[in-house]
Image (cartoon, rainbow, N blue to C red):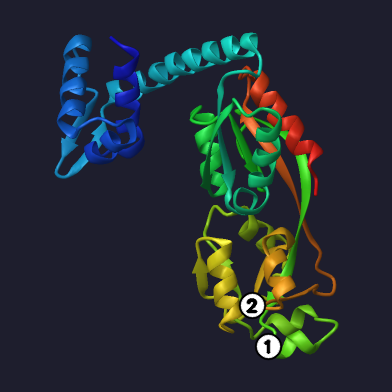
Amino acid sequence: MELRDLEIFLALVNHLNFTHAAQEIHLSQPSVSVRIRRLQEELGVKLLEQIGKKIVLTEAGQLFETHARRVLTAQSDARQVMEAYRGLEHGSLRIAASTTPGMYLVPRVVAGFKRQHPKIAISLSIKNTQQVEEAIIRDEFDLGFVGGHLISNEVEALPWRTDELVLVISPSHPMARRRQIKPGDLENETLISREPGSATQAAIEKHLPTRNPPAGAALELGNPESVKQVVIAGLGIAFLSKSAIETELKAKSLVARRVRGIHIDRELKIIHRKGKHLSSAATALIQTAQRLQA
């Protein structure tokens, strides 16, 4: 059994699709099929089976998945220990961020880090908060930057910064001329919302008064850039992070307002798998992020 076999198997577990798994690990689909067949022959059990067009894990496959992840996690930890030993002259970091931090804040952190440590390679993936947390638990990333409530005790969370959400509206919207907006003013407005799993959406739902739900809340979009464009077009209103609308406020294509009695702050956090050894590079990136608050 080779480590590469475990990587191929786990890619299949993640996608349950030979084509997508092959793309992830940069092999041809026939090569993936051959390696999986050989692995099953070596173990003497079926790990996966095809039911119609679907691939599902067998009971043996579910058991094997746990051990395969442990092996690859141990390999990753060993590599990071050696990277720490070599210092910050070599190495790499895999980081993930939820949508708003990933699009507007983390790039600044990466830029600041790279100025100090140019030889460290960094890859950044952007997902929603729930997906980042799940990927951190699977050890697909070294660090995650998120703004949501963590639900797993397999994750360690470090403080990062506070993020404020404000109401954004088109300059042509009647509310743009008001200095003060009351919760009741939102009742007949179309509130543009984010997708399930979004920390921004979870924060909004927690703070908006349930007695005054926006009557027109029917439009759901997958990222803040889409939300901004819909609001600019005058199709609705939205709550967004102040860090996401700096450019639009300067260009006066959006107006930001606070709603009386509603103050939406959330704590952004840096997360990693509990018990994971953090390399020198990961520790240095955390320090850079906590230092760069602007």
Where residue 256 sits in the image (x, y, percent)? 75, 74
> In this image, 122 relative to 164: left or right?
left
| Numbered badge on residue 13 | none
Indicate the quadrant where residue 291 lies.
top right
- Above or below residue 153? Residue 259 is below
* Comes first in the chain, label 2 or label 1: 1
Contact? badges 2 and 1 (CB < 8 Å): yes
Q: CA distance from mark 2 to mark 1?
A: 9 Å
Q: Amino acid at mark 2?
A: Ile
| Viewer-nearest residue: 178 or 151 | 178
| Numbered badge on residue 173 | 1
Where residue 9 sits in the image (x, y, percent)? 30, 25
- Above or below residue 183? Residue 163 is above
Residue annotated with mark 2: 237
Q: Amino acid at mark 1?
A: His
Q: Nearer the viewer, mark 2 or mark 1?
A: 1
**Which quadrant is the N terminus positioned in?**
top left
- Above or below residue 289? Residue 204 is below
| Residue at image coords 59%, 25% | 119
| Residue at image coords 68%, 88% | 173
Could you tell me which secondary element the residue under label 1 belongs to?
Answer: loop
Could you tell me which secondary element the residue under label 2 belongs to?
Answer: loop
| Viewer-nearest residue: 42 or 7 | 7
| Residue at image coords 50%, 35% | 135
| Residue at image coords 62%, 10% | 86
Mark 1, Cα crowd under 10 Å, few <14 / some 14-19 / many 20+, is some
